[in-house]
Each structure stands twice: as structure tokens, then as C-alpha cells.
Image: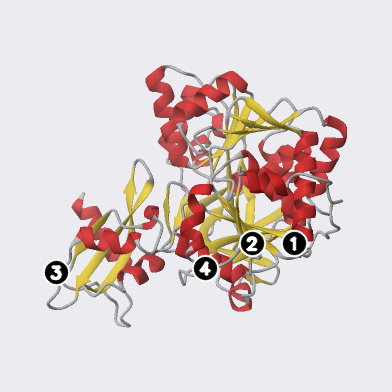
């Protein structure tokens, strides 16, 4: 089934209902939302787009983002949402790898991306996009549950982005889990998009469309704690996804201004480690409004959930252990801990977290080698390490060995290392994460200079900014005469992390 049918069905019964808002102003009813998406589907088909073709969205959050996404699906095409914070060179790689036929962009991102690719581009919220979304709608294209709906690009251990194939059936499964594990949705609710629509927040749009809820885009286009508090108070009840660092910033702002989060219904947090002290303080201040989810692009938003009751509970004898967990398996998956051969281990033993079920990907886009490593005997090998207790609560002992999670975004050290190694002054480099109260982790680089060369942090910073996104660049550079290595020549990042600990 095509997920775009959900929009069509909601428009049939609640066409006059408010659908998309910019701040508190309604800009699209459900009838108009559906009509514009259908008109875009017809325009894309008239331009030669066929079902299964890929269409990218390289844009910050805006009302037209949702119109573009559902229009792509209505045409039977595959959406390729790209993080708007990426460098144009990085976005261009994704466009090439996905074979995207065209791109919808934010107006201010168009020129830089156009310099990297010759694909046709249309800015959202422009006269050109308005013309594409005007006219007779195209009937929703037939799609099967196994057909692709979304290509989500996530970097792997090689540092090269991989396209996770997300099907219509996977989105339906994730959406089905939401009202069971996270929060029931009603037409009175508003999904507030403070986190990027190119990630989990965008996936959660589907269930809110199906239930006829409102979709509220902050005028800032991103996360501003004061704005979130004001919009929720004026136009709630609101639900939203936040990275742990966003929860921390929201709590700090609310405490400083004396606001208790009026209008906030639910905050779903995930995407990185949440310090237990931070969530305890957030619950103490805001009350029981928080639900934790654990997922990956390969099983989006749908591996485990720590319920609102569990997050707020202080009466259970093991509440602190449960609060430090990521909850229990969601309804449409099985979760197990496995050994190196993907054989399930008993409760309490530490091993690799494995998951299988309807929300799990069929594989990576045109990458059979990576697919074979990730999927074993029907299980997705997450690369994360943890253990299950006797009650089914999953606790992460570690995450994929070297991934840095900063502000809820995965940053892969090898990608940064490869960029730095192209600078003539850099002989060797190793990138690790440094604990940060604000961001969870900061990227830092240990660098060995090329003989006769001098390492200048400002020059290295400029070099990184010319090739990768700003948020990936190191926040500090530490010169070393040599990198610590084992007998096989492998860099010992554990030793580098110990060096960081000794510095603090």
C-alpha cells in the first residue's frame, strides 16, 4: 500500500481540518494539502518520472517539505531526504549514488548544490514549486508494501554514506508502533517539527497525517527552545522528537524563564545517549511528558521504547536501572542479544543487539556487501552492544565502536580523518569523541604532522569546512609525535580517549 493513501483518506473525511501550519498560522487544510501533493505527482509524471524513480529533498524544515514528500509518494517515486546541514559535496554524493532524477531545495541552498550537480532543481516555497503543485491531481500510484518509499543515507564504518531502503511497509509498521508504544494521536494534536524532517521527525509525519493531526513548522525552521515553549503554550497540545541535547536546552530555558511546558503533550527523545541526571531533571520540571525510543535508520524509530510511565516512575525498586535503559521491544519487532555468529544469548549477557520484524530494512541501496554484513539469518545486526534484563528492558553498554553522536547526529570519524589526511601538513590523524555537556560529544582530532610541516588549527578548520559539513569538523586539534598503535598497526582509540580523560 502507498503511504500517500493515508493523506487521501484523511482529506476525504477531514478536508476542512487544519493540516500544515507555519507557527500558529494555518497555511494548508487537509483538502488543499492532498490536492497540492496530487498535482505535484502529476507534474512529476508529466516530466517523465516513473514509479520507483528517486527524487531528493535538500531543504530545511518548511511547510512545502511535507507537500513535496507526499507528492513524491503519490507519484510512486522514492523520496531521498538529505540533511540540510550537509556540505554540498556530501549532498552531491548522495544524489549521484541514489540516481535522483531531480531535487527540491531550500532557496538558499540551491546555488551551492547546483555547482556540484547538473540535476534540475526547484526551490520549495517558490513560484516554480507553486506552479508544480497547481492543477488536477494524479491518482495515488499503486505501490506494494515491499516497494521503496524513502532512501535514508547513513554513513557506515567506511565513512561512505549508505542508502537504507525504507519501504512503504516499514513506514506503516513504524507508524503503527507510534500510538501503541509512544502516544495516541488525535486531530487535536500538533506535530511540532523542531528536529529535521529529513530524519525521524519526518517519518513520524505519516501517523499524524493518518490521524488528521496538525503539522506545525516553527518560523525559525529549527530548534529554538523559547519558540518551542511559546508555540506549545499557544497552539498545543504538541508532540515532537528531540535529541537528548535538545531536551537539556529546553529544560534550561524553561527553568530560567519559569515555564512549565504548557501545551506540550509528548517529547520523544532518542538519537543519542541521554544522561540520566538530565532526564530526571526534565521530568521533575515538566512532569510525565517524555518517551524514549531507540532505533536506527535500518529499523527507523522502532526497536525499543521506554514508556512515559517508566520514564516518570520513581516507585519501582529498579527505576534507576530502567531509566538508564532504552526500554522494551516495540510491538512489531523481536529484540535479542547475540554473539559473533548471531546466536541469541540469555538475559543479562552482553553482546550485539539484534532486531527483526516488519520495520527492519530489506537491505542497503545497491550495496549487497554491506547488506550481507548487516542482515544475518533474518536479524539486523545493529553494531550496538548491550544486554537485556529478565523483564525485557534493553540497556546499551556501548554503541557502534567509534561513532560520535553530537547533538543527536551520527558523525563517523573515518570520514573526517580522510578529509584531514588530504592536507599536506597532516601525516596521521585519529578522530574521537570528547564528552560535552551541551552536545553529548564533540569531535576532536589527534594529529601527527608531516615532517617539516607545521600544524595550524585555523588552516585545518578551513580545510575541513571546504569539504564536509560544519558540524562534523573537529572542535580541537591535539598534536602528537605518534599515534598509539597495537602490534598490527591499528590505532588504539581507547588510548586516545584515556589521553582526553587525563586532560580534564
Residues at marks 4 and 1 touching, judged by CB atoms closer than 8 Å? no
Q: Secondary structure at mark 1?
A: loop
Q: Which residue is mark 2?
A: 102
Q: Residue at x 57, y 66 (%)?
A: 95
Q: Residue 331 at what x, y percent from top left? A: 73, 47
Disc 4 to disc 3, how far (Cα)? 32 Å
Disc 4 versus disc 3: nearer the observer: 4
Across and down, in percent, residue 387 comes to 54, 55
Q: Quadrant of residue 9?
A: top right
Q: Which residue is mark 3?
A: 454
Image spot of residue 222 (x, y percent): 50, 39
Q: Earlier along the polypeptide chain: callout 1 or callout 3?
A: 1
Which residue carries the number 4 mark?
Answer: 93
Using the rendered image of the protein, determine whether residue 332 is visible from the camera's viewpoint.
no
Q: Residue furthest top?
A: 258
Q: In front of the other: label 1 or label 3?
A: 1
> Which residue: 34% across, 57% down?
473
Q: Is label 2 or label 3 in front? A: 2
| Along the viewing direction, whichever of 282 and 232 lies nearer the viewer | 232
Residue topped by disc 1: 47
Amino acid at each position: 500500500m502507498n503511504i500517500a493513501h493515508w493523506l487521501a483518506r484523511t482529506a476525504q473525511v477531514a478536508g476542512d481540518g487544519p493540516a500544515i501550519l507555519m507557527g500558529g498560522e494555518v497555511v494548508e487544510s487537509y483538502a488543499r494539502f492532498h490536492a497540492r501533493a496530487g498535482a505535484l505527482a502529476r507534474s512529476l509524471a508529466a516530466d517523465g518520472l516513473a514509479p520507483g524513480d528517486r527524487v531528493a529533498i535538500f531543504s530545511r524544515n518548511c511547510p512545502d517539505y511535507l507537500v513535496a514528500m507526499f507528492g513524491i509518494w503519490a507519484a510512486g517515486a522514492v523520496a531521498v531526504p538529505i540533511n540540510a546541514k550537509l556540505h554540498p559535496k556530501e549532498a552531491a554524493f548522495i544524489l549521484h549514488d541514489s540516481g535522483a532524477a531531480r531535487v527540491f531545495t531550500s532557496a538558499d541552498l540551491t546555488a551551492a548544490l547546483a555547482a556540484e550537480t547538473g540535476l534540475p532543481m526547484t526551490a520549495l516555497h517558490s513560484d516554480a514549486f507553486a506552479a508544480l503543485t497547481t492543477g488536477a491531481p494524479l491518482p495515488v500510484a499503486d505501490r506494494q508494501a515491499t516497494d521503496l518509499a524513502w532512501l535514508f543515507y547513513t554513513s557506515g564504518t567506511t565513512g561512505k554514506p549508505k542508502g537504507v531502503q525504507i519501504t512503504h511497509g516499514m513506514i506503516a509498521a513504524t507508524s503503527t508502533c507510534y500510538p501503541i508504544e509512544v502516544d495516541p494521536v488525535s486531530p487535536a494534536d500538533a506535530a511540532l517539527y523542531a528536529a529535521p524532517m529529513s530524519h525521524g521527525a519526518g517519518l513520524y509525519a505519516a501517523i499524524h497525517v493518518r490521524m488528521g493531526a496538525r503539522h506545525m513548522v516553527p518560523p525559525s525552521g529549527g530548534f529554538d527552545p523559547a519558540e518551542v515553549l511559546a508555540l506549545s503554550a499557544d497552539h498545543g497540545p504538541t508532540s515532537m522528537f528531540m535529541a537528548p541535547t535538545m531536551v537539556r536546552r529546553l529544560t534550561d530555558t524553561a527553568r530560567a524563564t519559569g515555564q512549565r511546558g504548557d501545551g506540550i503533550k509528548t517529547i520523544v527523545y532518542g538519537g543519542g545517549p541521554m544522561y540520566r541526571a538530565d532526564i530526571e531533571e526534565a521530568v521533575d520540571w515538566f512532569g510525565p511528558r517524555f518517551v524514549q525510543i531507540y532505533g536506527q535508520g535500518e529499523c527507523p524509530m522502532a526497536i525499543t521504547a521506554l514508556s512515559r510511565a517508566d520514564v516518570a516512575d520513581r516507585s519501582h525498586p529498579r527505576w534507576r536501572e530502567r531509566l538508564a535503559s532504552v526500554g522494551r521491544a516495540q510491538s512489531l519487532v523481536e529484540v535479542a542479544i547475540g554473539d559473533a555468529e548471531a546466536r541469541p544469548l540469555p538475559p543479562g549477557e552482553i553482546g550485539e543487539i539484534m532486531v527483526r520484524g516488519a520495520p527492519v530494512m530489506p537491505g542497503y541501496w545497491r550495496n549487497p556487501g554491506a547488506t550481507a554484513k548487516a542482515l544475518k539469518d533474518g536479524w539486523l545486526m545493529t553494531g550496538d552492544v548491550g544486554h537485556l534484563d529478565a523483564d525485557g528492558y534493553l540497556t546499551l553498554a556501548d554503541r557502534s565502536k567509534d561513532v560520535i553522536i553530537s547533538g543527536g547526529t551520527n558523525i563517523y570519524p573515518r570520514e573526517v580523518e580522510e578529509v584531514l589526511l588530504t592536507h599536506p601538513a597532516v601525516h596521521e590523524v585519529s578522530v574521537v569523541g570528547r564528552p560535552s555537556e551541551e552536545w553529548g560529544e564533540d569531535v576532536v582530532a589527534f594529529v601527527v604532522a608531516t615532517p617539516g610541516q607545521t600544524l595550524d588549527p585555523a588552516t585545518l578548520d578551513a580545510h575541513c569546512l571546504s569539504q564536509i559539513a560544519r558540524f562534523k569538523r573537529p572542535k580541537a586539534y591535539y598534536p602528537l609525535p605518534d599515534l598509539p598503535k597495537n602490534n598490527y598497526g591499528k590505532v588504539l582509540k581507547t588510548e586516545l580517549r584515556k589521553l582526553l580523560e587525563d586532560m580534564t
